[in-house]
Image (cartoon, rainbow, N blue to C red):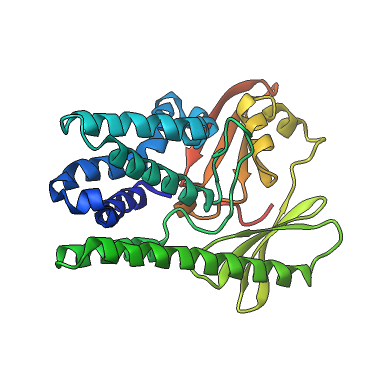
């Protein structure tokens, strides 16, 4: 999820913590609890520091080790330890439990996105992505904002955010059940050798679809029990010398391992070529789309690879 969602989640968990007898009997712990839950809810994104090495490095590292079981445990201990020292060495176990809960909730929300996480490292490096939520979900955001408003209005924060998180869980279950129903409906139209991937939108009943055929992709949507196709994009040819040359860049190797939905678009210039690699799962700027732009000279030698995010739309046609 995006940073604003993680911050709201941290605030919500601090409100929920008043169900903990330790916090309810020590209301003065609100500030250190906010420190623990807000920081804990954002700590897995510490890998943002890789951004300064370039988008390509960042995308290879993002939601990897920093979201692992090791990192969740270690970062929780550090944050809880700081809060404990600031409070005279007391309440370590309470701070640790709520910090770890914030960390786990961050990772669970990220698993619900398209990008997913390597949440179970070191036991497996498999990426887990449920494709249930866009990176910004208006319903979850509204729930938390509403909870904060009721908290400031004087209602019991523990009960308010208990309702918020039970509702959030039900919302995720409803999205999951709808996703299963849509997948079953897609099977009725399935052609031999074709695979479908469902992508979430803001609407419960509208899902984007990427269909992979032998030589091409089809992009469309499922809405009101109907499938509507909007784009057909050819798969990158194994025999195209320009595309083959662009694959020599290490970041393109990473993309090919990370997604099954890559589309390459070639542009020709007087001094060389440009190959744009799109991950077709990302069709909205809200879902952190990115495109790798590989520049080649006229002899097909690599000049540079630049990763751009959020500004280049999937081409309308091949």
Q: Nearer the viewer, residue 66 or 72?
A: 72
Name the outermost residue toward the right. 192
From the top left corner, tell me how far across and down residue 265 is, in percent: 65, 43
* Relative horizontal placement of residue 187, taking residue 296 as reference (left or right): right
Q: Nearer the viewer, residue 169 or 237?
A: 169
Q: Is residue 167 above or below residue 302?
A: below
Number of marks drawn:
0
Q: Nearer the viewer, residue 278 or 200?
A: 200
What residue is at 51 percent from the left and 30 percent from the top?
Answer: 65
Q: Is residue 126 above or below residue 295?
A: below
From the top left corner, tell me how far across and down residue 15 is, in percent: 25, 56
Q: Is residue 248 above or below residue 212?
A: above
Q: Nearer the viewer, residue 84 or 215?
A: 84
Q: Quadrant of residue 95?
A: top left
* Relative horizontal placement of residue 36, taking residue 225 as reference (left or right): left
What residue is at 56 percent from the left and 70 percent from the top?
Answer: 206
Q: Quadrant of residue 211?
A: bottom right
Res. 19 in view:
yes
* Relative horizontal placement of residue 150, taking residue 107 as reference (left or right): left
Res. 145 in view:
no
From the top left corner, tell me how far across and down residue 199 is, in percent: 59, 59
From the top left corner, tell me how far across and down residue 164 is, in percent: 35, 65
């Amino acid at each position: 999820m995006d940073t604003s969602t993680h911050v709201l989640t941290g605030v919500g968990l601090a409100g929920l913590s008043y169900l903990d007898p330790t916090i309810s009997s020590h209301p003065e712990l609100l500030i250190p609890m906010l420190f623990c839950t807000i920081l804990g809810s954002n700590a897995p994104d510490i890998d943002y520091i890789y951004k300064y090495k370039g988008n390509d490095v960042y995308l290879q590292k993002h939601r990897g080790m920093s979201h692992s079981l090791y990192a969740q445990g270690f970062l929780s201990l550090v944050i809880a330890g700081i809060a404990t020292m600031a409070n005279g060495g007391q309440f370590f176990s309470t701070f640790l439990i709520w910090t770890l809960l914030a960390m786990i909730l961050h990772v669970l929300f990220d698993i619900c996105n398209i990008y997913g996480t390597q949440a179970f490292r070191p036991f497996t490096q498999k990426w887990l992505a449920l494709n249930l939520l866009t990176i910004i979900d208006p319903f979850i955001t509204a729930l938390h904002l509403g909870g904060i408003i009721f908290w400031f209005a004087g209602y019991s924060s523990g009960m308010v955010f208990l309702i918020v998180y039970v509702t959030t869980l039900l919302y995720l279950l409803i999205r999951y059940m709808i996703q299963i129903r849509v997948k079953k409906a897609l099977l009725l139209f399935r052609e031999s050798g074709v695979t479908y991937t469902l992508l979430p939108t803001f609407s419960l009943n509208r899902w984007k679809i990427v269909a992979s055929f032998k030589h091409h992709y089809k992009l469309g949507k499922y809405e009101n029990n109907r499938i509507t196709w909007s784009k057909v994009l050819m798969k990158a040819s194994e025999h195209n010398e320009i595309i083959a040359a662009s694959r020599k860049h290490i970041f393109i190797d990473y993309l090919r391992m990370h997604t099954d939905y890559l589309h390459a678009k070639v542009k020709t210039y007087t001094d060389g070529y440009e190959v744009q690699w799109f991950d077709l799962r990302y069709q909205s700027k809200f879902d952190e789309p990115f495109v790798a732009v590989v520049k080649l000279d006229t002899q097909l030698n690599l000049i540079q690879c630049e990763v751009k995010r959020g500004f280049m739309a999937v081409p309308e046609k091949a």
